[in-house]
Image (tube, grey):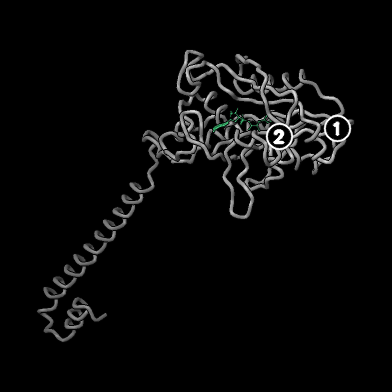
Amino acid sequence: RKGKIRQAMRLLGKMAPEERPTFGKAVNETSDAVSGAMENRRAELASERLGAALVDDLFDPTLPGKRENRGTVHPLTLLDWRLDEIFRSMGFYILDYPEVDSDFFNFEALNIPADHPARDMQDTFWLDDGHLLRTHTSAGQVRAMKNFEPPFRAIFPGRVFRYEATDASHEHTFHQVEGLYIDREVSVANLIASMKTLLSEIFGREVLVRLRPGYFPFVEPGFELDIGCLVCNGGGCPVCKKSGWVELLPCGLIHPNVIKAGGLDPEEWQGWAFGLGLSRLVMMRYQIEDIRLLLGGDIRFLEQFQGTGLE
Ligand code: FA5
């Protein structure tokens, strides 16, 4: 209302009649020109907004997609899941026991008293309070016997620790899976059959195995089950120390003293156990030539397991 055009229109009344037509015409033309310009600009702005929206919201199906960087599942976890599945289907419990344990469960209860030379087979990280980092998952054997009514079968996977020098096939921190079967009557034949089922499920084919006598104070008889090295296919490499064989699966029938430590009567109950080297199994399964890659945390190594086994 206070605009210049309105003010000019108000002037019309005070003008001499002969001046009015020309002045009036000029004001009207100006008024039309201004509203026309405003209309144009309004349309322009609207079409700019529409154009911008079209550009921003446009979906072009021919453009390449944006790659989402997802984390990958560690190969140790992949095989651990697979083993859980295989053993669960055979009626095994999946148990979890502490990494910090006592001398009793790691050694004493397994028929390895304080002065026993077998303690030197597994150099131990001791804690100040007399506890230790378990040197093997066998530390869970007597715990399991105390926890469950026999007959039962169970596996307990986990990290174990040894104070030892590292090389292509040895780590100070590595993974094992313990297997335990307690019943009134168990046999070596059944133990070996279970091991073979496990290996052929994991590798999807028969693998070359050999059985040797092995000494562990907590089993009698004890065996070492080796598999033909799948990193070099038996030709010889740093993983198998050029022997063509990899120590993978020590096992045996549980010693009566261990059955007793588990609170069971060895006259009534027997058992077998195995201690699978899970880290080495992963190396064989994925042909990894150095165990230190597993826990080294190198993202380029881990990324290679994209998608494996999860689908
Ligand atoms: C044991 O630890 C026994 N507790 C196994 C056992 C269980 C025997 C039940 C009988 C009955 P050993 O020290 O050999 O045994 O280790 C078992 C497996 O762990 C080996 O065969 C190997 O595959 C793996 N292993 C041993 N030391 C290392 C290491 N430093 N780095 C990586 N893997 C290892």
Q: Which is nearer the eye, 112 or 135?
A: 112
Indicate the amino acid at tag 1: Pro
Q: Secondary structure at mark 2?
A: strand
Is 165 left or right of 92, judged from the image as shown? left
Q: Quadrant of ligand 1?
A: top right
What is the three-letter code of the residue carrying label 2?
Ile
Q: Residues within 10 Å of mark 2 (few under 14, many from 20)?
A: many
Kindly identify the residue that appears in the image at 59 percent across and 18 percent down: 227
**Pointer 2: what residue?**
155
Left or right: 152 with respect to 61? right
For the point 36% across and 35% down, the residue is 63
Which residue occupies the extreme bottom position in the image? 14
Q: Mark 1 falls on what kind of element?
A: loop
Check disc 1 and report the residue beneath it. 266
Between tags 1 and 2, which lies in front? 1
Q: Mark 2 or mark 1, which is nearer the start of the sequence?
A: 2
Q: Is residue 28 visible?
A: yes
